[in-house]
Image (cartoon, rainbow, N blue to C red):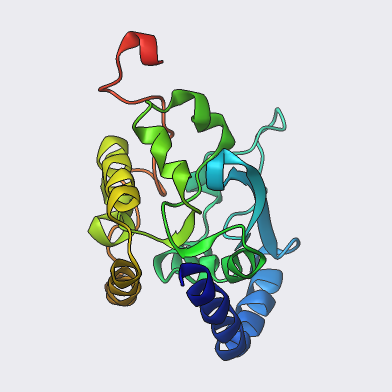
Amino acid sequence: MKRLMDTLGSVLGLILLSPVLIVVSTLVRLKLGSPILFTQIRPGLDAKSFKMMKFRTMTDERDENGELLPDNLRLTKFGAFLRSTSLDELPELINVLKGDMSLVGPRPLLMEYLPLYSERQYRRHEVRPGITGWAQINGRNALSWDEKFELDVWYVENRSLWLDIKILFLTILKVVKRDGISHGGEATMPRFEGSSGMKEEDQ
């Protein structure tokens, strides 16, 4: 049932939101240039890698050594608007249609974080990653990493079709209110360096 909901939901979303996708694609091309889409390898179900797609929100500005500038310096006002409205996430509907992601699940993070998880935190990979999830409606980037991962694992242990429907409904309210977009002084979230509660042997 979950996969059926994902397939129908992603197809319906791509059809209904096609005018929005076209407009955002055009604006990204005009304001940020090419490529329009930001793609990155992320861990999915069972931590298997897949290529996640989002609308680009940052410039490619670099310092004198050719290194990319920090996120907060490359994130434009237009990019911040896309993130605050979650419009940058819309291409992930294609990932859902392909079966790489689900409409609801833990957010797919960076591959380099995999060795840093505790055994419990690693359980977030027992389900497909989602466009939205239990952590997103309970604080999003305003949460600490430990809080976010605990919410992810809670979802894994309590997932159901009705819970997914509830999360989707509450996500719409969160997007309208633009809650939890950033964490402290960061553009989004600080990098995960390992859980503060991990034992030394778990690291």
Horizontal placement of 69 versus 123: left or right?
right
Q: Residue at x 41, y 25 (%)?
A: 193
Asked whether residue 192 is in view, the answer is yes
In this rendering, the answer to whether 104 lies above or below 26 is above
Residue 78 vs residue 94, the one in the foreground = 94
Which quadrant of the structure image shows residue 41? top right
Image location of residue 24, percent across then percent down: 60, 77
Image location of residue 68, percent across then percent down: 64, 38
Horizontal placement of 50 versus 2: left or right?
right
In this rendering, the answer to whether 14 lies above or below 66 is below
Residue 157 vs residue 96, the one in the foreground = 157
Which quadrant of the structure image shows residue 190? top left
Image location of residue 82, percent across then percent down: 49, 68
Asked whether residue 184 is in view, the answer is no
Image location of residue 2, percent across then percent down: 46, 69
Q: Residue at x 33, y 64 (%)?
A: 160
Q: How many marks?
A: 0
